Amino acid sequence: MPTAAAMAPAGVGEHIAAMEGTNPSGDARPDWSEDAFEALRSRGVRHVATVPDGGLGRFLQLCESDPGVRLITLTTEEEGIALACGTWLGGELAVVAMQSSGVGNVVNMLGLPNVCRIPCLLLVSMRGEAEERNPWQVPVGRAVPDVLGALGVRVLRPETAADVGPVCAEALAWAREACACGTGGPVAVLVSQRIIGVKSFAEEHAPSRGHGPAPGQGSSGGRESRPGGHP
Amino acid sequence: MPRGGLDRRALVAELLRHREDAAIIAGLGSPSWDCHAAGDSPLNFYLWGGMGGAAMLGLGVALAQPRRRVLVITGDAEALMGIGSLATIAAQAPRNLAILVLDNEAFGETGRQAGLSGESTDIAAMARGAGIASAFTVDSELLPQGEGARPLRGRPAVEALAHALFEAAGPALCVAKVSLTDGPDSFPPREGPLLRDRFRAALGCG
């Protein structure tokens, strides 16, 4: 079977290469995805619901390639909160993986795991932090910890790539307490841009273009998502 | 509002007589009151909030319990708020999940403001567009309307509809046009952990 990169249209291969751990500038950034996946998988997570993000690319690949995990693509992140409540009512845990902007989409639905004390774990790839190149990502990205906190979601922020796996394990334990004894509850693990890398944009790789792409030069603008660390 | 629409309380009560051990997810407002009025069960999970989430909650139960039939009973505005869920559900293709939309073409719980499913929007067509092939609308005589309307022939109508919702391979969605009426108050418990625990216990995973 051809690899995803081989099947992709020109220009997208670079994007996929970035998601596979080598970014366009060749940085070797410690990968957190395998630890996070293993921490969740070994503790009984069989459903992962997502609106994909470049920063989650490797994690989502691991989900997709494990026949014991069902990867559920959503139209909006709030669907994932309701889904996770449903799988738990049916006896199974689900994780909802999203970009930080997706936190803005889940607000009302978080009332459901909160009031019912249902285990619910959000894995959030952050945008809008230091060095963000897209200002439109900043308002919600910056608000994420406050929004989640105000809704009774515990926020955990691993400091390094090596912390992500253990923090996911801790988050899952906390989430489960929601049902077992009512002290835990919905929980979010925020994976920062320091760990993931800052998304870069096509025109920033083309110094001859000056202040932006000239008409007809085919820049992909902000639509490409590269999680790799731009220098 | 639908002229001469179905009586929602009678329809839900009649359908739920055929539920056997199916799990029911009831969307907030009148669909929850209808399900409760038909007879409370630990296998009923009533939503008092989370508007737009009923179908996805049902999908979650259906994926975790693939041998259990799951029926979501919800309203037109609740279904429209979570309309993208139908694409998500179509992609997962759960054979054990069906959705019944009680469509009174209004926001019945908040003062009967006009909804969007009366004049311009066809929820069953949206479901088919999302990829749910078995999606149809039934009118006041339970006669299927429009494209995709096939399952109700050859049996008394309610039994045929019950078959479509509880037995035929899912995912399926039925829009039932109902009158803009309320039955007598019939409120389910509103304690989330209580609803959660009894539902899980009834499914054997408590």
Image (spheres, rainbow, N blue to C red):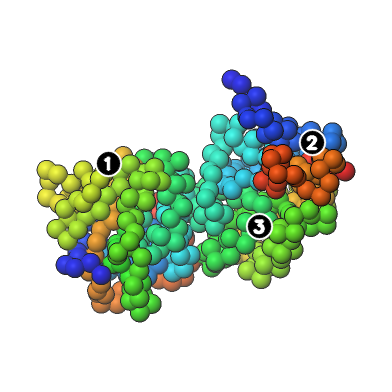
Query: In this rendering, do the residues under marks 2 and 3 share a single chain?
Result: yes
Residue A101 is tagged as: 3
Residue B84 in the image: above or below residue B91: below
Amino acid under disc 1: Ala
Q: Quadrant of residue A11?
A: top right
In the visual, does A75 lie left or right of A19? left
Is residue A100 in sight in this rendering?
yes
Say which chain tag 3 marks.
Answer: A
Amino acid under disc 3: Ser
Q: Residues within 10 Å of mark 1 (few under 14, many from 20)?
A: some
Is residue B36 in sight in this rendering?
no
Amino acid under disc 2: Asn
Residue B26: horizontal and vertical position, in percent?
37, 61
In the visual, does B65 lie left or right of A29? left
Image quarter where the N terminus of chain B lies is: bottom left
Residue B168 is tagged as: 1
Q: CA distance from mark 2 to mark 1?
A: 49 Å
Direction top: furthest residue: A1
Q: Residues within 10 Å of mark 2 (few under 14, many from 20)?
A: many
Q: Which residue is mark 2?
A: A23
